[in-house]
Amino acid sequence: ILNVEQSPQSLHVQEGDSTNFTCSFPSSNFYALHWYRWETAKSPEALFVMTLNGDEKKKGRISATLNTKEGYSYLYIKGSQPEDSATYLCASPNNNNDMRFGAGTRLTVKP
Amino acid sequence: NAGVMQNPRHLVRRRGQEARLRCSPMKGHSHVYWYRQLPEEGLKFMVYLQKENIIDESGMPKERFSAEFPKEGPSILRIQQVVRGDSAAYFCASSPNSLEADTQYFGPGTRLTVL
């Protein structure tokens, strides 16, 4: 993996469903993995910063895991609500502290 | 503690004019990042600055674009002789430390339209 990649590109779920999506990143020269939530016409909002292999972070119904050896992170949303609808971005800084973003997963939660 | 401030929020320029976008980082933050979001695309890194220093500008177009973060005052992203392809949302973010340890906080963005 040379770049930060996210899948799926978009996701539609029903209210109450739990869901998850993936971020893949270069596992060599890894420094950190960031997750952001980005609503249309607003600015990205930080969710998590993870640095250690095996890290798990949780914020309300949203949680994330990190595997630095294989270069992936999962974001989980438990019991999705319509207000969770947004684009979820992951990003990883390189050794110059430049942040490289994935293209995002656009989540739509239908009531 | 006010968040990251960007102004103007919307900027309209004619081809050939100059665009100046301003970013005031959060208080205590010395790291500033500029990103561009082209229509239907994600966020692309442009430049990373610390006070009075450009650390990495590998994402900046080689011509017409420049950035600064002076000792006093906001960070400025300057686009000379704008063209229609420069129309985009430009986001600034700041962090107190490097991104290994801290997250960055985004401003509301400046939406540039080139007529």
Image (cartoon, coloured by chain):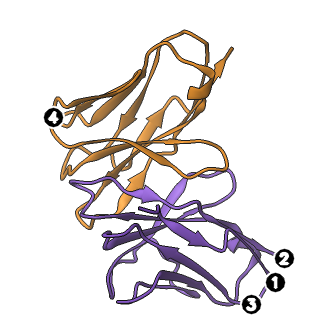
The residue tagged 1 is B14
Q: Are marks 3 and 1 in contact (CB under 8 Å)?
A: yes
Residue at the extreme front: B1
- Image height of B29 relative to A49, above or below: below
Q: Colour of chain A?
A: orange
Judge the density around disc 4: few (<14), some (14-19), many (≥20) Cα neighbours within 10 Å: some
| Left or right: A34 in relation to A89 | left
Quarter assignment of residue A95: bottom left
| Disc number placed over residue A53 in the picture, else none | 4
Q: Mark 2 highlights which residue?
A: B115
Q: Which chain is purple?
A: B
Query: Marks 4/1: CA distance?
Result: 50 Å
Q: Name the element at disc 1.
A: loop
Q: Are marks 4 and 2 in contact (CB under 8 Å)?
A: no
**Which residue type does callout 1 highlight?**
Arg
Question: Quadrant location of the C terminus of chain A?
Answer: top right
The chain letter under disc 1 is B
Q: Residues within 10 Å of mark 1 (few under 14, many from 20)?
A: some
Q: Which residue is mark 3?
A: B17
Q: Chain of mark 3?
A: B
- The reply to whether discs 2 and 3 touch (Cβ–Cβ < 8 Å) is no
**Lower sequence index among marks 2 and 3:** 3
Q: Is residue B7 above or below residue A11?
A: below
